[in-house]
Image (cartoon, rainbow, N blue to C red):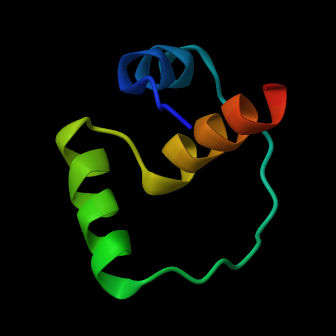
């Protein structure tokens, strides 16, 4: 699956959604790198994951 990072950031800037807690387990190094990249973009990991999941299920 190709991720359009710029599109995700654009969508995040438009929305504030109701949320519910859920736990996912990720490889530690992968999660840390992901969080670093999200921080560089000024977004939370949760918000980026939400947009990635929406993109995935829309395909």
Quadrant of the drawing holding the C terminus: top right
Please provide percent x and percent y for residue 39: 24, 49
Question: Relative to 22, is 43 on the left or the right?
Answer: left
Residue 48 spot, x, y in % from top left:
50, 42
Question: Is residue 11 shown above or below 44?
Answer: above
Residue 51: where, in percent of width, then height?
Answer: 62, 35
Task: Please say if 10 is above or below 31.
Answer: above
Residue at point 49%, 25% (across, down): 8
Instruction: Give the quadrant of residue 18.
Output: top right
Q: Quadrant of residue 31?
A: bottom left
- Residue drawn where x is 55% and y is 43% of the image: 47
In the rendered image, which quarter contains the N terminus? top right
Q: Which residue is at the front of the view, 51 or 19? A: 51
Residue drawn 45% across and 54% down? 45
Q: How many marks?
A: 0
Percent coordinates x, y for residue 25 in the rendering: 59, 83
Please give left or right for residue 25 compared with residue 33 in the image: right
Identify the residue at image location x=33%, y=59%: 34
In the image, 45: left or right of 59?
A: left
| Quadrant hosting residue 55 | top right
Work out whether 13 lies above or below 40.
above
């Amino acid at each position: 699956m190709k991720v359009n990072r710029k599109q995700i950031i654009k969508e995040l800037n438009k929305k504030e959604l109701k949320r519910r807690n859920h736990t996912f387990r990720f490889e530690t190094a992968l999660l840390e790198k992901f969080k670093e990249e999200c921080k560089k973009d000024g977004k939370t990991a949760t918000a980026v994951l939400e947009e990635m999941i929406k993109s995935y299920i829309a395909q």
